[in-house]
Amino acid sequence: MRYEGQEHTISVHLPAGDFGAAEISELIGRFKDAYEREYTYRLDNAVEIVSYNLIAYAAIDRPELAKLPGGGNTADAVKGRRTVDFDEQGLREATIYDREKLPAGADLSGPAVIEEVGSTTVVFPGQSVLTDECCLPRNTRRP
């Protein structure tokens, strides 16, 4: 909330329930009290609500996760090689992997890049990656 025409806002708790004239008057009073605590004065100007913040909670079922298949060939996930800048470690030739094709138990060493639709994992020289068997949402298909 803020005084009409002013830039700075003050957050005021808005309790749940129906609002009539008495509740709105109380809300404005709480705004003016909070404003005075913050800025050491209050005004007789009109007050406006400029935004609402809502916090909501809901219970949802956990998704069922399928284990990744193991025993696949890590070489099938190799997309190629390219030069990658590893900052202080400089330019290095890195193996590029397709995340969707990596089997459970894949053991990779950097320099490498693991690509997928939603993210990219950079494996620096000297680092290693071991994929575990967890997990894919049940409705995800693997090649």
Image: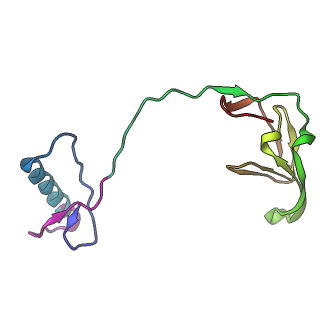
Residue at 81% x, 46% y is: 98
In the picture, which quadrant includes the C terminus? top right
User: Is residue 59 positioned above or below 56 on the image?
Assistant: above
In the figure, is residue 34 to the left or right of 131? left
User: Is residue 13 positioned above or below 42 on the image?
Assistant: above
Q: Nearer the viewer, residue 2 or 42?
A: 2
Q: Position of residue 111 (x, y in %)?
A: 87, 53
Q: Nearer the viewer, residue 17 or 7?
A: 17
Q: Give the range drawn in magenta.
A: 37-52
Residue at 88% x, 32% y is: 72
Main SS, magenta region, reads: loop
Q: Please state the total of marks drawn on the protein image.
A: 0
Residue at 78% x, 44% y is: 99
User: Is residue 115 positioned above or below 48 on the image?
Assistant: above
Q: How is the image coloured?
A: rainbow
- Based on the picture, tell me whether residue 51 belongs to the magenta stretch: yes
Q: Position of residue 59 (x, y in %)?
A: 43, 29
In the figure, is residue 116 to the left or right of 137? right
